[in-house]
Amino acid sequence: MTINIQIDDEVREATASEIKAVKLRQAEAEAEKAEAEIKAQAKAELLERLGITEDEAKLLLS
Amino acid sequence: MATTTNYGWTTPDDTALVKDGASAIRSLGTSVDTTTKALNPSTTLGDIEYRSSTANTNTRLGIGTTGQVLTVAGGVPAWGTAASGAGLTLVKSQVIGSAVSSVTVTGAFSATYDAYAVFLTGGTGSVNDENMTLQLGSTTTGYYACYIGAVYSTAASTIAANNNASNFTRCGNVITNGTQFSFEIINPFLAKRTYIKNGLYGGDTQFRTWGGYVDNTTSYTAFTLTPVSGTLTGGTIFIYGYSLS
């Protein structure tokens, strides 16, 4: 699959090293996104076990 | 000899002899010519005159160059460079092409400004509601940021962070209904830490604000946007510089 990149007005097919750089940026973001989703899921599960909403938890902690 | 009231030109007395008339007229004409020239010293297209410190004598000011404005220097008129307007000045706009996996904008930052506002408006992503990353220059380490948002439908908060990441992982949101984001970037060109402030973007499901910094003193002139998946098509990136004065 062709990967095109743009540098200012030039749009062209990415070189191998440029593809690697794009993949690296995407991988980092994917990892961060996955971690955030795990944390959000854990928070939701905890709130469910406690039987309270997020707002109620904030009130309890305030 | 009589003289005129304003310019002191010599005129014949009532009792002057007629035979001296030609000489008197010639003297008067010379005086008028001299005074007129002193009041109107222009020689060239675009010249203007202003009063000098000598009575009845103006000073010629030649036309300035394109873009100059009339100002004051040393108590007299002079052509000068127009002061740059306070506020924001468009540094560069970059239209995004079709189906590109990343967009690098060069020449975005320079010594002219310390702070910039960056906007992306319009355009679409091939994958809806996807994050977009921001990399400064070729730096792939030392990115720190916090992203705080809320989901429209539930008002639930969403939080994410970068802790020594290889880029800012959520500078914007790619959506098929029109990708957009904005952020301010402080000191990208200076040999100081580069800070991001007031990062804002909205997706189809939530809205986020973010800020952070890059932990180095590298001078940057370029940045790269990369959707986490899919491609970008269309839209325009605008970079504005905040005036230093």
Image: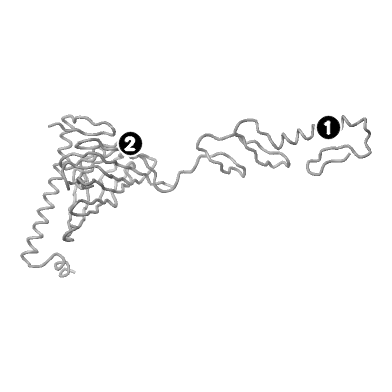
Residue B6 in picture, x, y percent from top left: 78, 43
Chain label for disc 1: B
Pointer 1 local density, CA inside 10 Å: few below 14, some 14–19, many at least 20: some
Viewed as shown, does residue B118 lie left or right of B61?
A: left
Q: Is residue B67 above or below residue B115?
A: above
Q: Amino acid at mark 2?
A: Gly
Q: Is residue A59 above or below residue B192?
A: below
Foreground residue among B31 and B134 = B31
Say which residue appears at 16% left-offset and 40% top-offset.
Answer: B230
- Residue bearing the label numbered 2: B107
Nearer to us: label 2 or label 1: 1
Residue B102 in picture, x, y percent from top left: 21, 37
The extreme front residue here reads B177
Q: Is residue B104 above or below residue B158?
A: above
Is there CB contact under 8 Å for labels 2 and 1?
no
Residue A15 in picture, x, y percent from top left: 18, 29
Foreground residue among B239 and B25 = B25
Q: Is residue A32 above or below residue A60?
A: above
Asked which secondary structure carries label 1, the reply is helix
Say which residue appears at 45% left-offset and 46% top-offset.
Answer: B85
- Residue bearing the label numbered 1: B27
Please identify the quarter of the rendering in which residue A20 is found: top left
Q: CA distance from mark 2 to mark 1?
A: 68 Å
